Amino acid sequence: MKVLIVGAGPAGIAAARELLHFSIPFDIIDSHTSAGGSWNSSNPSSAISPAVQLITSRRMTSYSDAPMGDSGYPQRKEILPYLTAYFQSMGIDRFFCGQHYIESIAMVADSKWQVSLSRKSKTTYDCIVIATGANRQVRVPSFSANLSVPWMHASKYTHPGFFAGKRVLLVGMGNSAVHIAREIVGTAAAVYISTNSGRWISPRYDDSGLPTDYPSKLPTDVDDQASGVLEEAQAARQLRPYNEKLWSLGVPQPEAGPFSHTVIVSDDLIELMRCEAIQFVNRAIACSGGQVHLSDGRQLLIDAVVFATGYLAVPKLAAGHLSAEKGSLFGLGSPNNGLYTIGNIDSDIGGFWTYEVAASIVARLIDAKRSGQRLNVRLPSLSELSGGCVFPRSNGRLPRVHGRTYLKAAQSLGHSLGIEVALNSDWKDVL
């Protein structure tokens, strides 16, 4: 039995740890020379801006067996040293091969997988775990081809100096857009955010001084399929006073609950709106030269555009083997076919935890394949992982699940497979 892990970022490292637990031989490869994935700023394929601000606290941005700390939010520069230290302390670096690109994968005889590498070599593996994550292939509207002014995807933003004296339009309303807008205020001549819908916005800390992403306990008599509805209602009540101030200042009001999209984390947007440093405008639908056409018929004359429009959902290597929906359920396509993905869902909880539970289950399935055991397990559907919430679906977007429901379903699936999935103590206490 030999397994290939593609990607040495947080998801790939989680997969490697779990395979070590089962003493399953593996290779872990990455296109870059060292581990860290998109958090490695020296990695040319990194899709995370060096200037990004994390929206999850230290306790939510770490593996369950290696807490980063209890206080505050980590800076971007802390993540790579954390991942590197973990990678080395677990001994995963012994199995790492850098500067390896995968050109294609194909199923061959005996349910094995043939991998074609960029160095023109072909190798056969029993299983493949694709852990390249979601932040790899950027999404940019097709009308960008008609722009005559400089533009970039938000992942390429580094510093505000590039926008000095420019009228800047940010397309899309998410954490990247708000963060970049906040940074370039005072440097740019004007800052606009174009969006077709509002988002819920949260301060970093609650009234007691704790990070707002800490999980809370729900009543024990709440049905799993209603837990998301209840938790979303609680979140809306807590966030409404803060958001009503923003709505009164011109920030678009969201049409759905806080769990429908990733909540924006910002402490100073209220002040920026009060001084009219940022203006929200309707959705950008077309452009010609330096003019952008908005959905309300208005036109904006701009000097630069930043597309904060996210990323494509399904890892390219899995195309033709996994559907976007099936590839999102605990990282699995089929429980027995030997091809798995990790890190390909969106939720209201930190990514590290979803990576860990998926890696636990994938490693157990690989262990079963090694022993010749064909498992008869049913994977929950996306609707069963919603917790009763209604999530918008669109082509190319990551499937979204309710985090608490996802973790409880992972626990249940793990028990049926005879394992205890890796869970952060904060979540063990409230599930």
Image: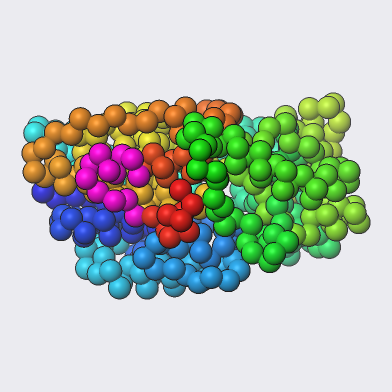
Q: Position of residue 214 (x, y in %)?
A: 57, 57
Image-quadrant location for residue 370? top left
Residue at screen point 36% across, 49% down: 357
Extreme residue toward the right, this view: 275
In front of the other: 399 or 307: 399
Instruction: Please tell me whether residue 122 is drawn above or below residue 84 in the rendered image.
Output: above
Residue at coordinates 54% horizontally, 32% vertically from top-left?
A: 226
Image vertical order of residue 270 relative to residue 380, above or below: below
- Over which residues does the magenta segment extend? 411-422
Measuring from the top left, give residue 242's x and y in whole percent. Answer: 79, 50
Q: Position of residue 381 (x, y in %)?
A: 40, 28
Instruction: Judge whether residue 421 is colored magenta.
Output: yes
Q: Is residue 183 left or right of residue 412?
A: right
The one of 48 and 345 positioned closer to us in this rendering: 345
Q: Is residue 265 magenta?
A: no
Residue 372 in picture, x, y percent from top left: 8, 39
Disc count in the image?
A: 0
On screen, residue 399 above or below 182: above
